[in-house]
Image (spheres, rainbow, N blue to C red):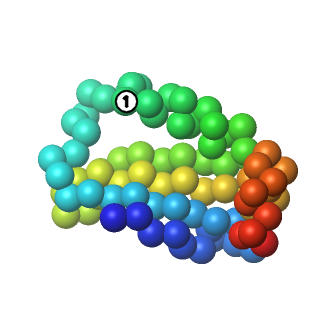
């Protein structure tokens, strides 16, 4: 499931992705494309959080400032 939500402040957006699977395991730190995803989010001035979902599964949350996203990708102008 993917949900676009309020990014906890004006001019911000958050994207949350959750599943109800077995989770990633305690030992996973890097891999599965997570490093590249984190680097891209940070380059846009955002933050990425990955962890367990209450009740089981995994939750990935990306928070971005809309201004940074629009500057890097003009097609994001539609989100203004």
Looking at the image, residue 45 sits to the left or right of residue 36; the answer is: right
Vertical order, 51 against 36 (above or below): below
Q: Is residue 2 left or right of residue 9?
A: left
Residue under the point 79% across and 64% down: 77
Across and down, in percent, residue 25 comes to: 22, 36
Q: Quadrant of residue 23?
A: top left
Task: Please give the name of the residue rendered at 34% of the width and 64% of the height, measured from the top-left corner.
Answer: 1
Q: What x and y, as percent, mark residue 4?
A: 52, 69
Q: Is residue 44 left or right of residue 37?
A: right
Residue 68 shows in the view: no
Picture quadrant of residue 19: bottom left
From the top left corner, tell me how far across and down residue 42 is, in percent. 67, 39
Nearer to me, 51 or 18 = 18
Mark 1: give few (<14), some (14-19) or many (20+) Cα within 10 Å: few
Specify the farthest residue to the left.
22
Based on the displayed image, in which of its 4 quarters is residue 29 positioned?
top left
Tell me residue 13's x, y (percent): 64, 65
Judge by depth and name the residue closer to the eye, 70 or 64.
Answer: 70
Quarter of the rendering occupied by the C terminus: bottom right
Residue pushed farthest front?
A: 75
Residue under label 1: 32
Q: What residue lies at 20% left-to-right and 58% top-to-bottom?
A: 20
Horizontal arrangement in the rendering, residue 13 relative to residue 18 (left or right): right
Q: Nearer the viewer, residue 39 or 70?
A: 70
Name the residue rendered at 45%, 33% in the picture. Answer: 34
The answer to whether residue 79 is seen in the rendering is yes
């Amino acid at each position: 499931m993917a949900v676009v939500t309020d990014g906890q402040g004006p001019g911000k957006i958050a994207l949350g992705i959750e599943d109800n699977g077995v989770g990633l395991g305690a030992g996973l730190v890097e891999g599965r494309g997570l490093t590249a995803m984190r680097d891209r989010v940070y380059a846009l001035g955002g933050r990425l959080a990955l962890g367990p979902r209450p009740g089981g599964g995994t939750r990935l949350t990306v928070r971005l400032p809309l201004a940074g996203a629009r500057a890097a990708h003009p097609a994001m102008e539609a989100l203004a």
